[in-house]
Amino acid sequence: MRNITADEARELLHYEPETGVFTRRVKTSSRAKAGSAAGTVNGRGYLRIRLTAKQYLAHRLAWLIMTGEFPPEQIDHINGVITDNRWCNLRSVTRQENNRNRAVRRDSASGIMGVRKHRPTGPWVARITVDGRRINLGYFKDLADAIAARKLAEAKHGYHEKSGRRSHD
């Protein structure tokens, strides 16, 4: 089954770039009426919209409607809120770039991505992954020094400024 075109998407949906909200322009089923909000949240938390018997992620449809084509790779939600489909919050990225704008895990002991306690000896260890390679940035007695090393490496390797944020930030 082929993907929907930009013109077809624009005929079926209205996308409001300022709010990221999609509404249906035409009735497509008994539940999908013209003027109703389009989409449901899937199991991963993304908004998905069914059009012409196929489901699409809303952020990819926003890109299609605004640019006339699907993104070549991935779409990053800059602020990390995956339901925030405002145009200003979306950017086309490679998988590697998208991974450089991730939130820190909720179970992180340090609260900082790439910084953890080295259990056997006690110091903090800082790491970063670049081009699929894990780079050890060193072992540190003080958490602040480990964090500083990680932040310096993030800047050096082009990580997004919001990388490592807490998921609710």
Image (cartoon, helix red, strand yellow):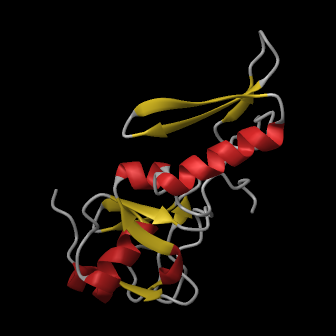
Judged left or right of residue 4, residue 15 is right
As drawn, the residue found furthest toward the top would be 120
Number of numbered labels in the structure image: 0
When the figure is inspected, residue 2 is found, relative to residue 9, above or below; the finding is above
Q: Outermost residue, left direction?
A: 2
Instruction: Left or right? Give the position of 158 relative to 142.
Output: left
Q: Provide residue 21's location: percent of width, then percent of height.
A: 54, 82
Q: Is residue 15 left or right of residue 122?
A: left
Q: Is residue 44 visible?
A: no
Q: Quadrant of the N terminus?
A: bottom left
Tell me where residue 129 appears, x and y as whole percent. Answer: 48, 37
Q: Nearer the viewer, residue 127 or 4?
A: 127
Quarter of the picture containing the C terminus is: bottom right
Viewer-nearest residue: 21 or 12? 21
- Identify which residue is drawn at 35% across, 75% down: 63
Q: Is residue 66 above or below residue 106?
A: below
Quadrant of residue 28 within the rendered picture: bottom left
Residue 2 at least partly seen: yes
Measuring from the top left, give residue 8's x and y in whole percent: 23, 81
Q: Is residue 71 left or right of residue 151?
A: left
What residue appears at the point 71 percent right and 48 percent down from the top-left corner? 148
Q: Residue at x 48, y 30 (%)?
A: 134
Q: Residue at x 57, y 62 (%)?
A: 82
Q: Where is residue 167 drawn, in percent x and y? A: 71, 54
Residue 91, relative to residue 17: is it above or below?
A: above
